Image: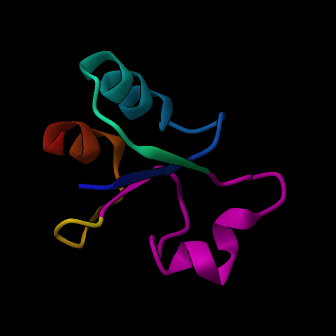
Amino acid sequence: MTLYLYGDIKTRALMPKWYMSGKGISYDYVNVDLTARQNLASSYLEVNPFGKPPALKDNSNGLVLFESGAILQYL
């Protein structure tokens, strides 16, 4: 299972990041630089059409979640 967490230091991605680190869940972190407006790039909008980090993508089942609370509940 490969998990990708998309976020920026200024987003709530820190909560799932801390949770996964604390639980030993392996994931790849993808930085989405809000100051460079990377959240509006087509590559990120394919993951999250709302353009707001955080997002979590689970390649094992194709699931994509957008809200930090939903991400934490899934984990």
Q: Is residue 30 left or right of residue 5?
A: right
Magenta run includes residue 52: yes
| Horizontal and vertical percent position of residue 16 | 36, 33
Q: Residue furthest top?
A: 22
Residue visible at 77% across and 63% down in the picture? 37
Residue visible at 63% across and 83% down in the picture? 42
| Horizontal and vertical percent position of residue 39 | 65, 64
Q: Is residue 8 left or right of residue 71?
A: right
Magenta stretch in the rendered image: 31-58
- Quarter occupied by the C terminus: top left
Residue visible at 47% across and 47% down in the picture? 28
The colour scheme used here is rainbow
* 70 to 58, vertically: above or below: above
* 31 to 14, vertically: above or below: below
Residue visible at 34% across and 37% down in the picture? 26
Quarter of the rendering containing residue 25: top left
